[in-house]
Image (spheres, grey):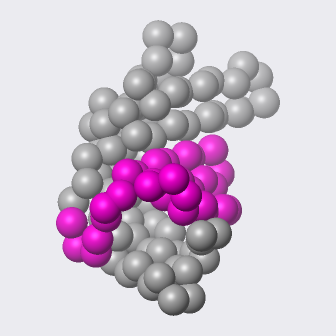
Amino acid sequence: MSAIYQGGFVQFRAAGVFITQNDPFETNVNYNLAGKARYIEDNGQQPCYYDFDDSFEGNLIFTKIDQTNYIISGTFEFSTVTEDCETVIVTNGRFDMQYIP
């Protein structure tokens, strides 16, 4: 898991999920993840790569943004599809991590 804040946006990733959100962002606001989430599924056979443009719906909510201790927390969900692989629906995603300023 990692998170970085730089150049006016935050990006974080874990377990094949990669999400970006432009600044300004604040707590308890529902941000649309269409075009902002990427997913890589590697099941050992043929990996499926879902790029940002493949995500067609989703939500991101920051529940905590601590700019002193560099901690972000929140929840997310999104759906993504690509021509060569099945539709993926990610639900109940959660994060609570330090970010690199």
Q: Residue furthest right?
A: 44
Residue at the spot 33% in from the left edge and 44% down from the top edge? 33
Q: Is residue 78 above or below residue 92?
A: above
Q: Is residue 32 above or below residue 34?
A: below
Q: Residue furthest front?
A: 7
Quadrant of the drawing holding the C terminus: bottom right
Relative horizontal placement of residue 23, taking residue 47 as reference (left or right):
left
Q: Residue furthest left?
A: 29
Residue at the spot 55% in from the left edge and 80% down from the top edge? 70
Q: Is residue 27 magenta?
A: yes
Q: Is residue 50 above or below residue 15?
A: above
> Does any portion of residue 99 appear in the rendered image?
yes
Q: Residue furthest top?
A: 83
Relative horizontal placement of residue 67, taking residue 44 as reference (left or right):
left
> Does any portion of residue 92 appear in the rendered image?
no
* Pick the front one: 67 or 13: 67
Provide residue 62's location: percent of width, then percent of height. 34, 70
Residue at the spot 46% in from the left edge and 67% down from the top edge? 94
Q: Quadrant of residue 1?
A: bottom right
Provide residue 45's location: percent of width, then percent of height. 76, 23
* Pick the front one: 70 or 35: 70
Q: Is residue 84 magenta?
A: no
Relative horizontal placement of residue 93, taking residue 99 as reference (left or right):
left
Q: How many marks?
A: 0
Provide residue 4's location: percent of width, then percent of height. 60, 61
Provide residue 3's location: percent of width, then percent of height. 60, 62
Residue range corresponding to the magenta coloring = 1-29
Relative horizontal placement of residue 85, taking residue 28 as reference (left or right):
right
